[in-house]
C-alpha cells in the first residue's frame, strides 16, 4: 500500500499538480512578482511576460534580485534589464541569458515609460517555469500580479505596494495542503521579504494544522529571499512527528500512512541593525518535492498589508 500511494503522489507531481483557475481569475497588473529564478547548473528557468492590451505598447523593466550568484556576496544585489512589448506581445526568455550574473533569487517587472518612470498599465501577465536537466518540466508558477493605482514615484525611488502606488500584498498567506515530510517527500518553501529591504532579516510566524484540526506554532527568520526545506523550518512538518506525536485522524491519512496538513503564515518582524518593522509584508510559495518530481502553485491570500516596498537598501528601509 505504501508503495502504491507514493507512486500515485509521484505521478501527480509529474503532472505539475495542476489546479483549477481561481473563481474570478487572476487579473493583469502593472507590476509582476516572479517568486524565483534558478540559474544553477542543470536548472533552466523560463520567464514569460505578456502584454494583454490590444492597443497600447509598454516598456517593461525587469529587476533581478540575486540572493546567490557567481560573484554575488549574498546581499541581494540588483540587476536590471529593459524590454518593449507591443500590443498583444509576449516574451519568453531564459533567465540565465537575460541575467547571467546571478544563480538564485527572484524577479519583479513593472511597466514604465521610455525614461524609466513607472506608469499605469494594468495589462501585464506572466509565468515562470523551471526545467530540470534541460529536458524535464519540473513546475511552473504564475507571477503575482499587482495592479497599479497611481504608480508615480513618491520620491523614494521604490515601487511601493501600499495601496497608493500599487495594490497591497496579502496580510496572510494560506497553503491549503502539505504532505508529511520524510523519505522521498522533501518539499521546500520559497520566502520573499517585501518590507525593509536588503538591510533586514524577516521573521515569519506559522500556524500549522494537522488533519484533525490541531494547531501548532513556529517561526522562521530569513534574509531577503530564501528557499528552505519545510523540515528546516520546524520538525512539525515531519510525517513521523504528525503520526506519532499529534492527535491526528487515522482515517484521514493518505493511503493509511502519509499524513497531510495545512498552514498559514504572516510576517512578524523585519529587523536591521537600527530599525524594526512590525507586521512586514512577505510572500511565500510551496514547492512540493516528491522523489525527482516537483509541483507548485500560488497560495491563497487573506487581508491586506501595506508595508511592502521593492526594494529598499537603506538602513531604515525607507529608500
Image: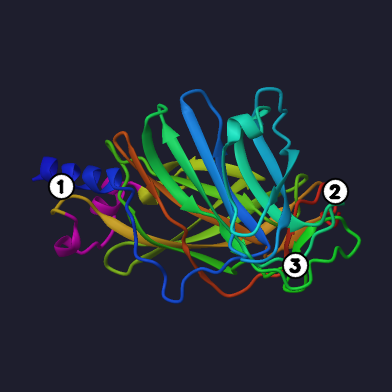
Quarter of the picture containing the N terminus is top left
Number of labels in the image equals 3
Which class describes the residues within 10 Å of circle 1: few (<14), some (14-19), or many (20+)?
some
Q: Alpha-carbon distance for marks 1 and 3?
A: 49 Å
Which class describes the residues within 10 Å of circle 3: few (<14), some (14-19), or many (20+)?
many
**Looking at the image, which is closer to me, 103 or 32?**
32
Instruction: Give whichever of discs 2 and 1 has the lower sequence position.
Output: 1
Q: Alpha-carbon distance for marks 2 and 1?
A: 50 Å
Rendering coords of residue 51 (x, y %): 61, 58
Q: Is residue 244 magenta?
A: yes
- Please state which of the two labelled residues, at mark 3 or mark 2, is closer to the viewer: 3
- The answer to which quarter of the image holds residue 172 is bottom right
Instruction: Give whichever of discs 3 and 2 has the lower sequence position.
Output: 3
Residue to which mark 1 is pinned: 5
Span shown in magenta: 238-254
Q: Is residue 241 magenta?
A: yes
Q: Secondary structure at mark 3?
A: loop
Q: Secondary structure at mark 2?
A: loop
Which dot marks residue 120? 3
**Looking at the image, which is closer to me, 219 or 313?**
313
Judged left or right of residue 249, residue 159 is: right
Residue at (76%, 51%) from the top-left corner?
311
Which class describes the residues within 10 Å of circle 2: few (<14), some (14-19), or many (20+)?
some
Amino acid at each position: 500500500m505504501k508503495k502504491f500511494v507514493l507512486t500515485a503522489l509521484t505521478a501527480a507531481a509529474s503532472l505539475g499538480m495542476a489546479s483549477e483557475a481561481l473563481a474570478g481569475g487572476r487579473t493583469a497588473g502593472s507590476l509582476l512578482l516572479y517568486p524565483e529564478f534558478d540559474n544553477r547548473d542543470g536548472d533552466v528557468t523560463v520567464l514569460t511576460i505578456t502584454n494583454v492590451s490590444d492597443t497600447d505598447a509598454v516598456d517593461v523593466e525587469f529587476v533581478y534580485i540575486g540572493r546567490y550568484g557567481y560573484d554575488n556576496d549574498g546581499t541581494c544585489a540588483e540587476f536590471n534589464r529593459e524590454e518593449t512589448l507591443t500590443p498583444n506581445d509576449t516574451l519568453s526568455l531564459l533567465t540565465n541569458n537575460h541575467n547571467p550574473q546571478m544563480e538564485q533569487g527572484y524577479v519583479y517587472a513593472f511597466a514604465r515609460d521610455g525614461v524609466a518612470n513607472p506608469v499605469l498599465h494594468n495589462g501585464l501577465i506572466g509565468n515562470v517555469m523551471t526545467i530540470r536537466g534541460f529536458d524535464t518540466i519540473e513546475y511552473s508558477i504564475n507571477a503575482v500580479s499587482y495592479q497599479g493605482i497611481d504608480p508615480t514615484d513618491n520620491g523614494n525611488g521604490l515601487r511601493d505596494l501600499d495601496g497608493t502606488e500599487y495594490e497591497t500584498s496579502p496580510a496572510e498567506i494560506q497553503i491549503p495542503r502539505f504532505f508529511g515530510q520524510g523519505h522521498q517527500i522533501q518539499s521546500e518553501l520559497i520566502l520573499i521579504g517585501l518590507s525593509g529591504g536588503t538591510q533586514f532579516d524577516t521573521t515569519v510566524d506559522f500556524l500549522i494544522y494537522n488533519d484533525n484540526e490541531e494547531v501548532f506554532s513556529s517561526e522562521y527568520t530569513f534574509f531577503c529571499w530564501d528557499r528552505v526545506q519545510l523540515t528546516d523550518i520546524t520538525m512539525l512538518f515531519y510525517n513521523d512527528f504528525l503520526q506519532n506525536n499529534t492527535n491526528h485522524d487515522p482515517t484521514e491519512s493518505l493511503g493509511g500512512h502519509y499524513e497531510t496538513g495545512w498552514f498559514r503564515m504572516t510576517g512578524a518582524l523585519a529587523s536591521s541593525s537600527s530599525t524594526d518593522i512590525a507586521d512586514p509584508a512577505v510572500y511565500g510559495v510551496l514547492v512540493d518535492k516528491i522523489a525527482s518530481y516537483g509541483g507548485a502553485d500560488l497560495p491563497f491570500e487573506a487581508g491586506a498589508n501595506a508595508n511592502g516596498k521593492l526594494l529598499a537598501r537603506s538602513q531604515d528601509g525607507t529608500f
